[in-house]
Image (cartoon, grey):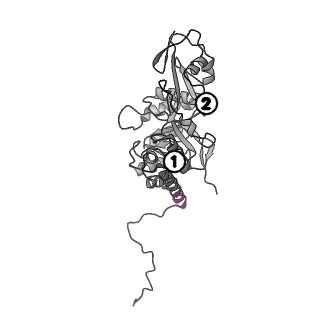
Amino acid sequence: MTDLLTIAGRTFRSRLMIGTGKYATFQQMREALEASGAEIVTVAVRRVNLDRKEESLLDYIDLNRYFLLPNTAGCQTAEEAIRTARLARAAGLSDWVKLEVIPADNTLLPDPIATVEAAKTLVAEGFVVLPYTTDDHTVAKRLLDIGCATVMPFGSAIGTGLGLTSPDRLQRIIEVIGGQVPVVVDAGLGAPSDAALAMELGADAVLINTAIARAGDPVQMARAMAVGVEAGRMAYQARRMGKSAVASPSSPTVGRVGDK
Amino acid sequence: MIIVVNGQQRDITAGCTGVKLLEELDLTAERIAVERNGEVMNRQTFAACTLAAGDVIEIVRFVGGG
């Protein structure tokens, strides 16, 4: 039985999405992508450097194999994000965009109001919008209602590696959104156990960048994350046992040696 | 005549086209998108433009990001 992830009518085998930032070299990034088994790969949009010729990221990503998801990282307002999304689409790969609107502070947490505003415009312009959002279920519901293709709540702040700081809030988003559009946990995951937990809770996919790129061995960590995501997904499908405050022996309580 | 490309002033010859500018900037092989005076366009549309003095051009590409 194939367990496919479907986003806006497009299907993927892998539930691990990978970012391409922060790698020591493009070669290392390519090897990590390969090891992760990911099919969706995020990229940023930036000015071409006119002072010196720089190597092209796309020379290291096989576009027949990976689906490129441009982000609007760095955009602080809805207007900037819309402008960046339009530029990304004009580059001619797809009309998908990972929408990020993050105010100019050092928290790197999304501006939910500007995100909803930008998402409305982009959906109306025919974009497939995958918004990065907070762990608030009402915001997630708004994004669903205006036609976003996924919702992408954070696990914790970008680049922190703190994992899921509020699993109960993620659970609520999954309850409200699950089964309608995929819930993709994006940002803050630090280890395969974090990715596994997100998937066990019923997330449809996770997106990881820093935890792989900044691991001691990014290629090995990419493999570990893939296994973590798969284990979490399988556990979700298998439906874990309930938690009990009372202990319960696993071995028979009768027939013990020396029983009277 | 003077135009602004990615925030830098640039002196180009009158009648210069988008395709000529991209050649000068060694961007003929790169996957790019362009904004000219606030209007987003793909490479082909920009290539066909005749640039005007005072044009403000942004040329972007994909880089690593999460």
User: Whole-percent x and y of residue A189?
Assistant: 43, 48
Looking at the image, tell me whether mark 1 or mark 2 is earlier in sequence order.
1
Question: Which residues make up the magenta segment?
Answer: A229-255
Q: Residues within 10 Å of mark 2 (few under 14, many from 20)?
A: few
Residue at the image point whose x is 38% and y is 69% from the top: A246
Q: Residue furthest left?
A: A106
User: Whole-percent x and y of residue A239?
Assistant: 52, 61
- Give me the chain letter of mark 2: A
Task: Please tell me whether the stretch drawn in magenta is mainly helix, strand or loop.
Answer: loop
Query: Which mark is nearer the camera, 1 or 2?
Result: 1
In the picture of the structure, the residue carrying the numbered disc 1 is A32
In the picture of the structure, the residue carrying the numbered disc 2 is A92
In the image, residue A152 above or below residue A72: below
C-alpha gap between disc 1 and disc 2: 25 Å
Name the quadrant of the C terminus of chain A. bottom left
Is A194 displayed left or right of B24 in the figure? Answer: left
Disc 2 element: loop
Residue at the image point whose x is 50% and y is 34% from the top: B63
**Amino acid type of the residue that numbered disc 2 sits on in the rendered structure:** Gly
In the image, residue A149 above or below residue A2: above
Residue at the image point whose x is 53% and y is 45% from the top: A17
Disc 1 element: helix
Which quadrant holds residue A86?
Answer: top right
